[in-house]
Image: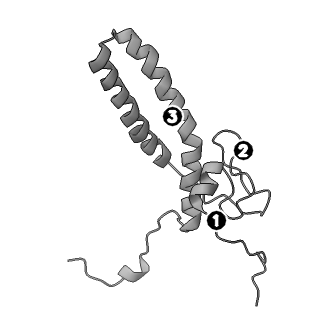
Amino acid sequence: MADARDSAHYPPQDPLRTGLAGRCPRCGQGKLFDGYLTVRPTCRNCGQSFEFADSGDGPAVFIMMLVGFVVVALVLVTELAYRPPIWVHLILWLPLTVILALLILRPLKGVMIAQQFKHSAREGQIDDAGEEGKDLD
């Protein structure tokens, strides 16, 4: 008996490609975001619900590591080569840090959501059924 909820068959999508493009991880066509970082409730193309989508702090952690590594390396090279005053560092590196973080945040969030879809990642739940009657000593 066929599944009444979904009769369409979608080929597997590459999570990296769809996430970076901000597209639906199921069909690869519909938009994932409604605004800059707000995830749409459903895909307008295939109807896939995005209720599962919760990237949490994952993108922020990766951005801090990636952008932090690049900016700190550039700060060190600049400091060792030119020894500019502190105000030059502030003028150069604060805007660069903000711009890089904002440029990377949306695509990285899209990739995290696409990976969640591909691997059917859901919130963890405690399963007490298997633990009944066992002694915890």
Return the residue nearer the eye: 84 or 100.
Answer: 84
- Amino acid type of the residue that numbered disc 1 sits on in the rendered structure: Gln
Earlier along the polypeptide chain: callout 3 or callout 2? 2
Which label lies toward us, 1 or 2?
Answer: 1
Distance from the alpha carbon under mark 3 to that under mark 2? 19 Å
Q: Is 50 positioned to the left or the right of 128 in the image?
A: right
- Label 2: element kind: loop
Quarter assignment of residue 115: bottom right
Mark 3 element type:
helix
Answer above or below: position of 70 versus 90.
Answer: below
Question: Dot 1, crowdedness within 10 Å: few (<14), some or many (≥20)?
Answer: some
Q: CA distance from mark 3 to mark 1?
A: 26 Å
Q: Looking at the picture, which amino acid does disc 3 mark?
A: Ala
Q: Could you say which is closer to the camera, residue 47 or residue 63?
A: 63
Which of the numbered marks, if any, corresponds to residue 34?
2
Q: On the image, which quarter does residue 85 sit in?
A: top left
**Upstream in sequence: badge 3 or badge 1:** 1
Taking the spot 71% from the left edge, 50% from the top edge, the residue there is: 40
Q: 47 or 30: which is nearer to us?
A: 30
> Amino acid under label 2?
Asp
- Circle 1: element type: loop
**Residue 24, position in %: x, y?**
69, 57
What percent of the width, then of the height, locates residue 105? 55, 40
Residue 111, visible in the rendered structure: yes
Tell me the crowding category of disc 2: few under 14, some 14 to 19, or many 20 or more residues within 10 angstroms, Cα based.
few
Q: Which residue is mark 3?
A: 101
**Which residue is label 1 attached to?**
13
